[in-house]
Image: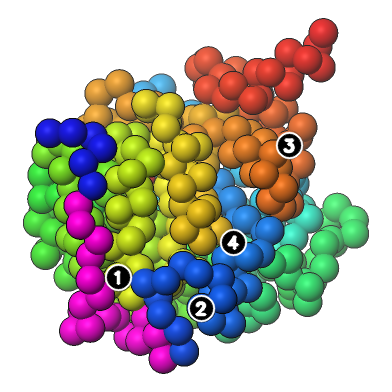
Amino acid sequence: MSLFRVRPLLRCNATRLCNQSRRYLATSSAADPDPSAGTNQQRHATSNRVRLVEVGPRDGLQNEKKAIPLTTKIELIEKLAKVGLTDIEAGSFVAPKWVPQMAESNEVLEYLLKYPPNSLNPIAYSFLAPNAKGLQNALSILRNHPNTYRTLDQQTSSPYEPDEASPAKSAPGAESTSGKPLIELSVFAAATESFTQKNLNCSIAKSLENFKEVIQGGKAHGLRVRAYISVVLGCPFEGYDVDPKKVAEIACDLMEMGADEIALGDTTGMGTAPRTSELLRAMHAAGIRNEDMAMHFHDTYGQALVNTAVSLEHGIRSFDSSVGGLGGCPYSPGATGNVSTENMAYFMESLGMDTGVDLEALCDIGDWITKEIGKPNGSSVGKAILGKRGA
Ligand SMILES: CC(C)(COP(=O)([O-])OP(=O)([O-])OC[C@H]1O[C@@H](n2cnc3c(N)ncnc32)[C@H](O)[C@@H]1OP(=O)([O-])[O-])[C@@H](O)C(=O)NCCC(=O)NCCSC(=O)C[C@@](C)(O)CC(=O)[O-]
């Protein structure tokens, strides 16, 4: 088996195109990342704007063995809200016996609704929910705090552009409708049966059944719903050969259920440039639009930014990252965290892309949170900038 073996280019399978893709394909070819292929695609693929989804407070902290105080989790979110990010993954409505670190996510959500952090732009806070119980737990908090958050129909701009109708807050504590947070839910599928069984204690088919309820329930309440697919470029149990067609098929299923975005997770960091490219060709061939995808790279083998560059070339403009490179995977021994937000922001800036984030301030947060939880700073850019500043 070679890491660089590339399968033949997948052909568009018209019968598997999901409904949302059909809408797009009516005007252009989704298999073609050519910026001239269509109006939306053109704006998306040629825009300098990149959306960074900060996943540190959830993906970054969920595996920490030592209990992290609720106040630290909230302080982390509040600090991140101030640096220009538009998307922060804040918690997880999963079974506490499976992921004890996320057990206080209800309190995190409640806090964000009662005391929305000061931020430069309105922020979307997302929470994982794997099943009906997770959905109901999230909804019961939202019901107790009506009119404190924006629903999808109140969002005025695309995630790729600054929200012009929702200007930055001018003073700490300033309140406006546009300053209300957008609350999102995320379901999380996986591309292999073994990983799904370990992570969700069920088969892929059963997990999709559960997600349908969450996606449709969330959408019925006006929430945006993201759908992860994990281990898309390598599984700790089944190895490198994860079938990109299978990933695309699951993505179509999730889009057909109503998911607003597919986040492709390289959970183990086993992804390489050629296989990232192969995966994105499979996604395009299945009709999934670039603007409906985000890439979620872990940096275990140091390939996250290489794979990010490949994804940018394919026209993707949404990327997950975690401040300080926080995180890991309980089922992937030696796996490190997500690519750090500091490295991602620096890399994007070096390419002339606009992330909207304050890199210096991010570095301070990475330094603070890693000290707070007693871990080494996992961001090379963070350490370099802090070192230079101290010199
Ligand atoms: C899905 C389950 C719950 C099935 O777990 P199960 O044990 O099969 O579920 P169950 O239905 O038999 O219930 C067992 C107990 O959990 C409770 N329960 C059941 N559901 C919930 C819930 N939502 N919230 C709170 N409690 C819940 C339920 O009420 C019951 O309580 P008991 O009667 O024993 O007291 C479990 O497997 C689970 O919680 N798994 C979560 C695993 C997880 O969070 N993994 C990390 C996130 S995925 C990830 O990190 C990857 C990603 C997204 O970052 C992308 C990437 O990097 O690739």
In the rendered structure, does residue 9 fall within the stretch colored magenta?
Answer: yes
Q: Would you place residue 181 above or below residue 271 in this image?
A: below
Q: Residue at x 69, y 51 (%)?
A: 353
Cα gap from disc 2 to disc 3, whole angstroms:
34 Å
Sequence-first disc among 2 and 4: 2
Sequence-first disc among 1 and 4: 4
Residue that carries the numbered disc 3 in the rendered image: 359
Sequence-first disc among 4 and 3: 4
Residue that carries the numbered disc 1 in the rendered image: 285
Cα gap from disc 1 to disc 4, whole angstroms:
30 Å
Residue that carries the numbered disc 2 in the rendered image: 37
Q: Would you place residue 134 above or below residue 233 in this image?
A: below
Residue in the foreground of this view, choosing between 278 and 160:
278
Callout 3 secondary element: helix
What's the amino acid at mark 3?
Leu
Residue that carries the numbered disc 4 in the rendered image: 124
Sequence-first disc among 1 and 3: 1
Cα gap from disc 4 to disc 3, whole angstroms:
20 Å
Q: Residue furthest bottom?
A: 26
Callout 1 secondary element: helix
Sequence-first disc among 1 and 2: 2
Residue in the foreground of this view, choosing between 85 and 71:
85
Magenta residues, start to end: 7-26
Judged left or right of residue 215, residue 199 is left
Cα gap from disc 2 to disc 4, whole angstroms:
30 Å
